[in-house]
Each structure stands twice: as structure tokens, then as C-alpha cells.
């Protein structure tokens, strides 16, 4: 196997593929990255797989000798990232690989390619949407996913589509984040759902190419959460697949109150900055208290002999005066998911869940992002 590649293109493709490599591979061969060239193509195919997540990328190269080789993915990524500005020559000869770039030369040992598992096939495409919109939606809901692996269902992001509507949702029992967006399904009546590991989906969203589209492909076993389903994402010639969490997601819509006793609208950015300032005096697990009246919201933290902070902001508030308390981190996660200039907070009772949402552009429209969070009890 022998080829020549552009340094920047090769380094980018290697770095992208290396994201799928496990930090602690259960078998040494799974730390490898497979590189393959065929005689009838000018593309170098790179792939990584750990039995859960697979990544495949292609980059244009000048192929002199076709072949396939398996080398340490992390090491190849570090080498490619630090090569000088010159074309890269890659030559595999037996159990060694020679990488030459300008005056730099590296010799890598190969891994047994015959022991490397076959990558799963890409499922049939279900639909597509803007990569920027999808990545933004993942960033909005992923903070609400649990980090506790003892409850796998809560560590996932629920991806559900029906017709031209795609919905992402996540929860850790104390808050629920839901983002609805439009997409283009392959068939008008397409329906399906998948519970995708949140960490994996977050990494996939980070690696998407801006200004392009992403195809989402769902295996036939996935709808309804039965069987070991799989979901795939293809963007700019790069494919990622991941196994789904074999569990049903919670029926979260019933958790959102149908009516509100009070509603506040406040400028999003000033509220976020005020929460960050007031929270400076809050110890770990200490809430930030918010008191709402007709024209003013007062934020407070700290009490008694401890450090204290308070700040007031203008607010449009309808309803009886309300006083609630939140974990500052949970509140900031919700406000950070809003992409409108003003934030809406809907209340029922001081001890019942509060719903944060964006303020729709048109009257009567539903918000695209909703974030339900449980307030904390304070004396």
C-alpha cells in the first residue's frame, strides 16, 4: 500500500476518525485505525470501530499501490497533526508503515488487520436537515441528560420524528429539555424513534461540517425501542453509526403543565449574567432565589453569616407574586439553551416544575425549545 496525500486534508480526516476510538479499548486491535485504498478509486478510506460506535471518512489521495493496513489511531492522529507543511507519503511494507512528510520520517508498527471487526452497514436514510440546526439542537438538550450510567435510559437523547417534525429530548429526572425542529423526511409519513447515547451524539454534533446537511439513518429494529437498533449520520462524506440504548424513553409530554398560574418574560442575556454574578457567593448545592413581582425580578444568594448577593432586573410578569429557588447550574443550562432575546418562564406553584422556553416570533406559535426544571425548597 502506497499513496500521497495533502497534509491538511489527511490530518483533518485522521483527527475526525480518531474521535470514535475508545479511550480504554477492551482489545488492543480496537485502538487501531483502518486505512484502505483500492485500485479503482482515488479515495483513502479511514475507519474506526469499538463495537458500539463506528466512524468512516474519505479523503482524496494519489494511489500508487492499493491495499489496507491497521495502525494505532491515536498515534497516527498525533503524527498527522504535527507534520510539516508538505505532501505526505505513506508506504506500508509488511509489519511496518513509513510516513514521510518533508524532512520528517516516522515508522509505525501495524496491528493484525485480520482480527479487526467488520464495520456495520449504514442503515437506510430516514431524512435530512441542516447540520447547523441539528448540532444546535443537540447542544440545547444534551446538558439535561444524566451522567449516571447506572440508569442507561437517562443517559440518552431521545430522537423522534413524525412527518416533517424532528424532536430531541433528554432528562436526568430533575429537568427535561425538549427541542422541536423541522427536517426533510425520505417519505412524508415517516415515523420512528431512537434513544441515542448522549455523549456519542454530542461528539457527532461537534464534528459536523457547518453550512451542509446531515442525513439521519435509522435501522428497522429501532422504532419502538425493540431490539438492538442502530442509528447513522452522514455528513460531507463522513459516516458515523452507533448502537442505541435498548430502553423506552419516558413519556415526558405529560410532565409539562398544560396551564400556568403566572408567566414572566425577561431579557435572556442580562438574566444569565445576573445569575452568574449572584451565584458567586453560593456554595455547592446552594440555590439562587428569584422573586417575581409585576415589574421586577430580584435574584439573591447566600444568607445569615455567609456572603450574600442580590441583583434586580426589569421583567414583564403576570400573576400573583412568585418566589422560587433553583440550582444555578440547572438554571444556566436552561437559559443557555434559549436562542431568543427574551426568555419565558411559566409557573404553577413555587414548589412545582417551572418551564423555561423561548418567546416565539409569532403570536400563538409554540416555542421550539422547552426546559422543565424542578425548583428547590427553601425555608
Image: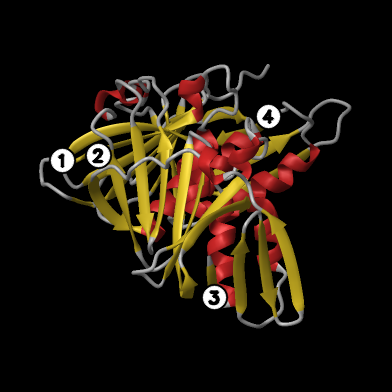
Query: Which type of secondary structure does the marked residue at label 4 adopt?
Result: loop
- Between 203 and 115, the one nearer to me in the picture: 115
Q: Earlier in the sequence, mark 2 or mark 1?
A: 2
Q: Are marks 2 and 3 in contact (CB under 8 Å)?
A: no
- Between 296 and 245, the one nearer to me in the picture: 245
In the image, residue 41 above or below residue 188: below
What residue does disc 4 label?
A: 287
- Between 336 and 282, the one nearer to me in the picture: 336
What residue does disc 2 label?
A: 161
Query: Which type of secondary structure does the marked residue at label 2 adopt?
Result: strand
Q: Are marks 2 and 1 in contact (CB under 8 Å)?
A: yes
What residue does disc 1 label?
A: 190
192 to the left or right of 25 = left
Give me the C-alpha separation between circle 4 and circle 1.
Answer: 44 Å
Tell me the mark number nearer the camera, choosing from 2 and 4: 2
Give me the C-alpha separation between circle 2 and circle 1.
Answer: 7 Å
- Between 287 and 260, the one nearer to me in the picture: 287
Q: Residue at x 63, y 32 (%)?
A: 27
Query: Which type of secondary structure does the marked residue at label 3 adopt?
Result: strand
In the image, residue 111 above or below residue 91: above
In the image, residue 352 above or below residue 7: above
Q: Position of residue 16 (x, y in %)?
A: 54, 57
Q: Are marks 2 and 4 in contact (CB under 8 Å)?
A: no
Give me the C-alpha separation between circle 4 and circle 3.
Answer: 55 Å
Query: Which type of secondary structure does the marked residue at label 1 adopt?
Result: loop
In the image, residue 353 above or below residue 181: above
Q: Are marks 4 and 1 in contact (CB under 8 Å)?
A: no
Q: Residue at x 49, y 34 (%)?
A: 51
Task: Check the picture and name the quadrant holding the C terminus.
Answer: top right
Which numbered tag is attached to residue 5?
A: 3
Amino acid at each position: 500500500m502506497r499513496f500521497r496525500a495533502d497534509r491538511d486534508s489527511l490530518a483533518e480526516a485522521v483527527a475526525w476518525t480518531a474521535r470514535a476510538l475508545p479511550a480504554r479499548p477492551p482489545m488492543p486491535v480496537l485502538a487501531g485505525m483502518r486505512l484502505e485504498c483500492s485500485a479503482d478509486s482515488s479515495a483513502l478510506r479511514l475507519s474506526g470501530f469499538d463495537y458500539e460506535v463506528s466512524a468512516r471518512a474519505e479523503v482524496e489521495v494519489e494511489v500508487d499501490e492499493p491495499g489496507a493496513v491497521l495502525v494505532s489511531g491515536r498515534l497516527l492522529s498525533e503524527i498527522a497533526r504535527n507534520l510539516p507543511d508538505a505532501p505526505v507519503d505513506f508506504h506500508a511494507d509488511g509489519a511496518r508503515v513509513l510516513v514521510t512528510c518533508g524532512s520528517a520520517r516516522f515508522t509505525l508498527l501495524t496491528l493484525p488487520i485480520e482480527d479487526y471487526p467488520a464495520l456495520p452497514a449504514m442503515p437506510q436514510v430516514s431524512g435530512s436537515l441542516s447540520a447547523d440546526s441539528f448540532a444546535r439542537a443537540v447542544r440545547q438538550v444534551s446538558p439535561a441528560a444524566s451522567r449516571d450510567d447506572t440508569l442507561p435510559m437517562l443517559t440518552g437523547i431521545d430522537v423522534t420524528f413524525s412527518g416533517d417534525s424532528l424532536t430531541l429530548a433528554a432528562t436526568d429526572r430533575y429537568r427535561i429539555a425538549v427541542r422541536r425542529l423541522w427536517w426533510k423526511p425520505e417519505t412524508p409519513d415517516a415515523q420512528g424513534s431512537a434513544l441515542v447515547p448522549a455523549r456519542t451524539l454530542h461528539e457527532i454534533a461537534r464534528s459536523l461540517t457547518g453550512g451542509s446537511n446531515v442525513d439521519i439513518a435509522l435501522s428497522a429494529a429501532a422504532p419502538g425501542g425493540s431490539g438492538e437498533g442502530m442509528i447513522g449520520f452522514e455528513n460531507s462524506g463522513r459516516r458515523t453509526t452507533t448502537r442505541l440504548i435498548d430502553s423506552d424513553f419516558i413519556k415526558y409530554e405529560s410532565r409539562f403543565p398544560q396551564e400556568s398560574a403566572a408567566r414572566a418574560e425577561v431579557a435572556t442575556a442580562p438574566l444569565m449574567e445576573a445569575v452568574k454574578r449572584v451565584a458567586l457567593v453560593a456554595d455547592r448545592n446552594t440555590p439562587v432565589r428569584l422573586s417575581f413581582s409585576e415589574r421586577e425580578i430580584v435574584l439573591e444568594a447566600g444568607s445569615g453569616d455567609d456572603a450574600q448577593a442580590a441583583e434586580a432586573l426589569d421583567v414583564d410578569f403576570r400573576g400573583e407574586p412568585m418566589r422560587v429557588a433553583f440550582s444555578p447550574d440547572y438554571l444556566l443550562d436552561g437559559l443557555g439553551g434559549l436562542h431568543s432575546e427574551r426568555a419565558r418562564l411559566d409557573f404553577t406553584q413555587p414548589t412545582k416544575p417551572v418551564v423555561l422556553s423561548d418567546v416565539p416570533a409569532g403570536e400563538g406559535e409554540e416555542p421550539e425549545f422547552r426546559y422543565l426544571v424542578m425548583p428547590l425548597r427553601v425555608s
